[in-house]
Amino acid sequence: MTIIKSSIKTKNPIKEYRFYWLYPLLIWLSIFPISLIFMFFFNFFSFWIDPIIIVCFLPISLVIYYLGFVYFLLLFTKLILILANLIHQPKEGIFQRSSKDKDFKFFLLRRNLKSFVLKIFNYFPLPWAKILALKIFNIKIPYNTGVLDSFIDSDFIEIGNNTILGEGSIVMSSMVLGDYLFVKKVILKDSCTIGAFSVIAPGTILEEGVILGMGSYTKINQCLKKNYIYFGRPAKKWKKNEDNFILTKK
């Protein structure tokens, strides 16, 4: 395909800041309800409790305030995404990188919204928080997945149980190829291990028990066979993963 042979570009010709106005809107929508709740709480209890006691509980109140903000941020982002999907459903395929292409425009909209929220969840102190956000965004990912400091694309990703993504690894279901956007579902089946700083290209399928070595990357639409170790750029079959093969046989 001539599209696949085109040079890969990291930036899009359409200026993505056209969707940046949604960020302050989301922040305002998230802060407003939790602020009303706290104002009511403090005004109500100020008649019954000494203000000094209320001040003593201020650190806990800030934590609760932050949790409330994150919850409403996730809620309103989900509502906007549902509305966007009702207008134009996300789909796999090859699309023109043009402001006239609805698939590309709505792809940018969804990606900008999800990336903004996920960046906030990256700073959340609990490790399962990022997985919760990904699940809310319709990514099939169990809570026993180890995401560490990895990047996971925002659409068409399916991850199986006990899969580990190494630090700095990237799982992409979309890629800019020349003047086109390529979107294809990525499937990582049970008990896969992705090495640090490895890259999973769109359309890749990792069968059960696959290990991808550190710093490797897969080709578009590549299928990595069950219980094998792959390594290289691009990834090539190296040897049988004997330990995992024995465990799965049992």
Image (spheres, rainbow, N blue to C red):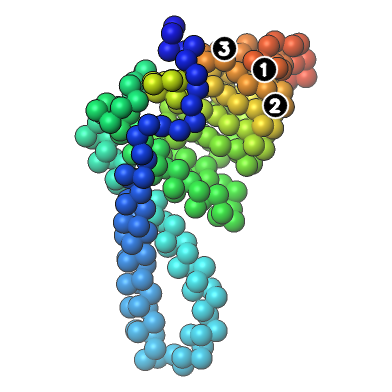
In the image, residue 98 lies at what x, y percent? 30, 27
Please identify the quarter of the rendering in which residue 49 is found: bottom left
The reply to whether discs 3 and 1 touch (Cβ–Cβ < 8 Å) is no
Instruction: Give the vertical position of 230 relative to 74 (above or below).
Output: above
Query: Mark 3 belongs to which amino acid?
Result: Cys
Residue bearing mark 3: 223
Query: Mark 2 belongs to which amino acid?
Result: Gly
N-terminal of the pair, mark 3 or mark 1, is 3
In the image, residue 224 lies at what x, y percent? 61, 13
The reply to whether discs 2 and 3 touch (Cβ–Cβ < 8 Å) is no
Q: Say which quadrant the N terminus sits in.
A: top left
Q: Dot 1: what SS?
A: loop
Q: Dot 3: what SS?
A: strand
N-terminal of the pair, mark 2 or mark 3, is 2
- Closest to the camera, between mark 2 and mark 3, is 2
Instruction: Give the vertical position of 237 relative to 243 (above or below).
Output: above
Q: CA distance from mark 1 to mark 2?
A: 8 Å
Residue bearing mark 2: 215
The residue closer to the viewer here, 19 or 205, is 19
The residue positioned 53% from the left and 80% from the top of the image is: 57
Residue bearing mark 1: 233
The reply to whether discs 1 and 2 touch (Cβ–Cβ < 8 Å) is yes
Other residues around mark 3 within 10 Å, as few (<14) / some (14–19) / many (≥20): some
The residue positioned 49% from the left and 74% from the top of the image is: 61
The residue positioned 35% from the left and 49% from the top of the image is: 20
